[in-house]
């Protein structure tokens, strides 16, 4: 089974609208972390936001927020008031186990987001 | 700022050649990773290293080897390049961000094997 599933290969969104990028995960480990990365066309991977499995509140970072629904095993990225510079590939990733010791990430297949002016 | 550099942005090699991809980080990080990225497949882990001279296989190690002689440098080696190794290769090192240990990525090397 896929550990990280991103079901939207591509999305087109009008500028200034909010956008939700879907991510579901599969793990039996009670301790895990979920990451979102952005990859512009230049290729570098940029860390956006993190949610730990024991975090009580949804993570937020500026215009980014993570809609964490633990029972459904979903960790959707929400971008508010989208901008042209948000056009990029977005990857969801999971680290299983505690913060220390296991640093490996499993990535999803990504969603290509295009913001339309 | 953490800086992870990779020796080349673009590389073209012939089938059967031995290929070296170099990755250097300047933050004294212990943990380093090599991924390949292919359309529709996301990033897949090839090898990683938790310390000098230490390496562990990732999910797709076949056809690759690695070397970590110094803490700051992690090299990926394609012993005999094949066309199915045409891909984007990304190196990362792990260190503390503002709240969590993050993977910091290099700019990537787009390798074409002809």
Image (cartoon, rainbow, N blue to C red):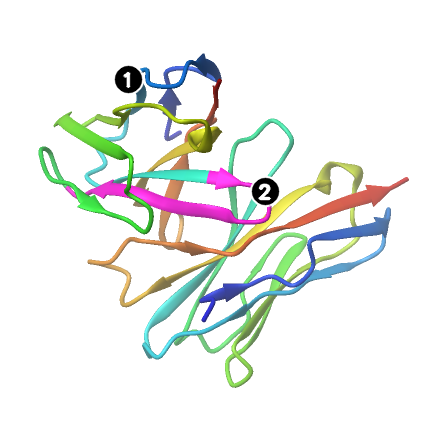
Give yes or no for residue B97 being in the magenta stretch.
no
What residue appears at the point 38 percent right and 21 percent down from the top-left corner? Answer: B6
Residue B85: image location, x then y, percent:
42, 31
Place of residue B95 in the rendered image (x, y in percent of width and height, measured from the top left): 30, 43
> Relative to the observer, which residue lies in front, B15 or B92?
B15
Labels 1 and 2 in the same subunit: yes
Residue tagged 1: B18
Residue A71 makes an appearance in the image: yes
Residue A40, percent from left and from top: 63, 35
Dot 1 crowding, Cα within 10 Å, few <14, some 14–19, many 20+: few
Residue B39 is labelled as: 2
Chain letter of mark 1 equals B
What kind of element bears circle 2? loop
Name the image quarter holding residue B31.
Answer: top left
Position above or below: A26 against A12: below
Q: Nearer the viewer, residue A28 or B15?
A: B15
Q: Residue at x 39, y 75 (%)?
A: A27
Q: Which is more N-terminal, label 2 or label 1?
A: 1
Furthest toward the left, the residue is B53
Q: What whole-number distance in Å separates the C-alpha atoms at marks 1 and 2?
A: 24 Å
Magenta region: which residues?
Answer: B37-50
Q: Residue at x 59, y 42 (%)?
A: B39
Decide whether residue B38 is among the magenta residues. Answer: yes
In this view, B52 is above or below A66: above
- Label 1 element class: loop
Q: Quadrant of the N terminus of chain B?
A: top left
The answer to whether mark 1 and mark 2 are in CB contact below 8 A is no
């Amino acid at each position: 089974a896929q550990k990280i599933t991103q079901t939207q290969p591509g999305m087109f969104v009008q500028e200034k609208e909010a956008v939700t990028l879907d991510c579901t995960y599969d793990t039996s480990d009670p301790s895990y972390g979920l990451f979102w990365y952005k990859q512009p066309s230049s290729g570098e991977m940029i860390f956006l936001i993190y949610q730990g499995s024991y975090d009580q509140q949804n993570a937020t970072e500026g215009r980014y927020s993570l809609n964490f629904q633990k029972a459904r095993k979903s960790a959707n990225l929400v971008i508010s008031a989208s901008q042209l510079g948000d056009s990029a590939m977005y990857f969801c990733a999971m680290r299983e186990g505690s913060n220390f010791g296991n640093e490996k990430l499993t990535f999803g297949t990504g969603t290509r987001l295009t913001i339309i002016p | 700022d953490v800086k992870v550099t990779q020796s080349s942005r673009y590389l073209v090699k012939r089938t059967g050649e031995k290929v070296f991809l170099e990755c250097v980080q300047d933050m004294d990080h212990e943990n380093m990773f090599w991924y390949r990225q292919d359309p529709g497949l996301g990033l897949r882990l090839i090898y990683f290293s938790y310390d000098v001279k230490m390496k562990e296989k990732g999910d797709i190690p076949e056809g690759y080897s690695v070397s970590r002689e110094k803490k700051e440098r992690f090299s990926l080696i394609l012993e005999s390049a094949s066309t199915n190794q045409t891909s984007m290769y990304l190196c990362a090192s792990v260190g503390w961000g503002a709240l969590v240990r993050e993977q910091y990525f290099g700019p990537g090397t787009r390798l074409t094997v002809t």
